[in-house]
Image (cartoon, grey):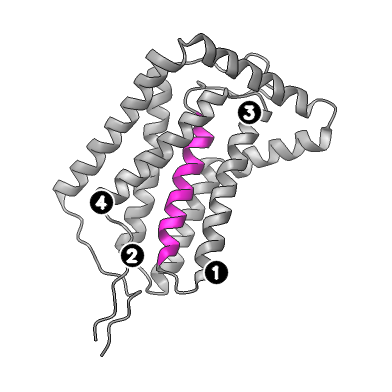
């Protein structure tokens, strides 16, 4: 019987893979923290770009209440409290449909949650204050953007999960929507003035890198196989 090239291949979770994945993800987070602390934040021209970005965002929303309300709504919908349940639901559906194993769905979600925690840890290491002219009041530190970090983590996980779906239009649609969601979230944080451009940029970088490292070292979504004659 020919083997279905979309049939998931179960990959055991072993201690060495877990340690390697966590170590690599932590090192990536520390690199982003060091880059922010010693290169980006002290740079006068980066600070100038950041200030212009905040000013642009505030001026753009000024006098447009509907835009302001939409930006605030998206800030809620793009938070981790929405991103990770979506990843969990998608993984659960694929597991129920036998596209991936339940273990793969769980590992995928755990990679995301670990990335979320590393993003929060990075903020505590750098302790960069938020812009003082923000449109809305938000607590916590500014670098890197937590929303940008988590939406990029979610985007990478969704894109990786849908690769087991047979229909090409579903894979491409999910990929486009994931990328658009990440881009919209990045713009939203700048428009609201709650983050600098460098905060958002490095949040996207951090989320993408730690997730790719986690998926590469601790494969959660099986790669497709060629049919066997």
| Disc 3/disc 4 C-alpha distance (Å) | 33 Å
Q: Is residue 154 magenta?
A: yes
Q: Which badge, 4 or 2, comes first in the chain's sequence?
A: 2
Q: Which residues are magenta?
A: 145-163
Question: Nearer the observer, disc 4 or disc 2?
Answer: 4
Q: Secondary structure at mark 1?
A: helix
Separation (CA) of disc 4 from disc 2: 15 Å
Classify mark 3: residues with Cα within 10 Å, few (<14), some (14-19) or many (20+): many
* In front: label 3 or label 1: 1
Mark 4 touching mark 2, by CB under 8 A? no
**Magenta stretch: includes residue 16:** no
- Report the side of 178 relative to 7 (left or right): right
Q: Which residue is mark 3?
A: 190
Label 4: state its secondary structure.
loop
What is the distance, in whole Å, between disc 2 and disc 3 at their CAs? 38 Å
Quadrant in the picture for the C terminus? bottom left
């Amino acid at each position: 019987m020919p083997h279905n090239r979309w049939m998931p291949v179960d990959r055991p979770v072993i201690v060495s893979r877990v340690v390697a994945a966590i170590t690599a993800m932590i090192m990536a987070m520390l690199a982003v923290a060091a880059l922010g602390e010693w290169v980006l934040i002290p740079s006068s021209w980066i600070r100038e770009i950041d200030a212009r970005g905040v000013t642009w965002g505030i001026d753009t929303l000024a006098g447009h209440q509907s835009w302001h309300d939409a930006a605030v709504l998206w800030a809620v919908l793009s938070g981790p409290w929405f991103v990770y349940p979506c990843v969990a639901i998608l993984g659960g559906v694929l597991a129920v449909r036998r596209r991936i194993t339940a273990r793969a769905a769980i590992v995928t979600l755990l990679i995301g949650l670990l990335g979320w925690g590393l993003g929060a840890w990075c903020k505590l290491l750098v302790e960069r204050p938020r812009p003082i002219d923000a449109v809305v009041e938000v607590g916590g530190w500014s670098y890197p953007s937590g929303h940008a970090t988590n939406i990029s983590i979610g985007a990478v996980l969704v894109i990786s999960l849908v690769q087991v779906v047979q229909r090409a239009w579903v894979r491409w649609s999910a990929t486009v929507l994931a990328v658009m969601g990440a881009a919209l979230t990045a713009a939203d944080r700048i428009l609201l003035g709650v983050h600098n451009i460098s905060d958002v940029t490095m949040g996207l970088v951090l989320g993408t890198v730690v997730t790719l490292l986690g998926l590469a070292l601790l494969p959660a979504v099986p790669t497709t196989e060629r049919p066997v004659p």
